[in-house]
Amino acid sequence: MLRLILNEGAEHAMDFYLQRLQDAIGSVTEGMSAELLARRLTPDKWSAARSTRASLPTYTGTIKGFEKCIVAGKPLARVRTWKDRTRTMVVVGCGYLPQGRKAPENAMPRGLPPDRVLAEITQKIAVMDAAISQAEQKFGSDAALLDHPILGPLRAQQWRKFHWVHGRHHMKQLRRLRQSLLEK
């Protein structure tokens, strides 16, 4: 199905938020060797590669969700609740991702080698952009298309901005980690 999404339809420029996400990842990891990406400050802290890799399951999950939506021929979002609207407003509307929330188990990073992490992330963001765009074209920009596990039903642009906000959260961690590693 991924190939179908990438090859179907006219060429389009990547969405603003997702392009910013790719640019931010490239900027913060520029010049970092695989060895530096794999290094941890302390045994209990994540490496830059693992922190970056933590976003991959969210991209993969979004891609799979949008593929199901497209195959079903309809949006798969439930009706929004007031909690959904409040959470969405905080994260997507205000761009604030509360800290301290542990990632769901299915979003925990798996063992992709550090030298493959950046290429994999770039590819997943492009596929995710195509999947979201395809669903948006098919069902409209005002339709809630798919449920986020915490925020609830989101429209296409809300999904894009969520991934930017979530990625920005990881980029802050990476900048601090990079600075500490380079100072050593």
Image (spheres, rainbow, N blue to C red):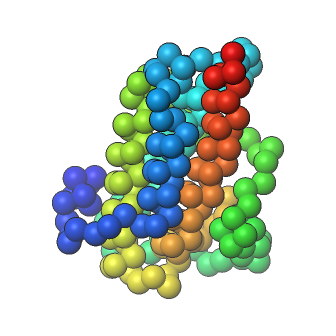
Residue at x-position 50% and y-position 64%: 17
Q: Position of residue 8 (x, y in %)?
A: 20, 65
Who's the residue at 36% across and 54% down the image?
A: 126
Q: Return the x and y of residue 71 as percentages of the image width and height.
A: 31, 66
Q: How many marks?
A: 0
Q: On the image, which quarter does residue 91 sit in?
A: bottom right
Q: Is residue 54 left or right of residue 118?
A: right
Q: Compare residues 172 and 134 and report the one nearer the observer.
A: 172
> Which x, y percent locates residue 181?
65, 22
Question: For this rendering, which residue is in front, 117 or 107?
Answer: 117
On screen, 12 above or below 100? below
Find residue 121 and report its image quarter. top left
Front-most of residues 75 and 113: 113
Q: Most extreme residue toward the front, as rendered?
A: 183
Residue 138: tell me if it is visible.
yes
Q: Is residue 41 above or below residue 82?
A: above
Q: Does 152 sit left or right of 134 as displayed?
A: right
- Left or right relative to 109: residue 94: right
Question: In the rendered view of the protein, which quadrant contains the C terminus?
Answer: top right
Residue 135: where, in percent of width, then height? 37, 72
Query: Is residue 40 shown left or right of residue 42?
Result: left
Of residues 23 and 40, which is closer to you in this image? 23
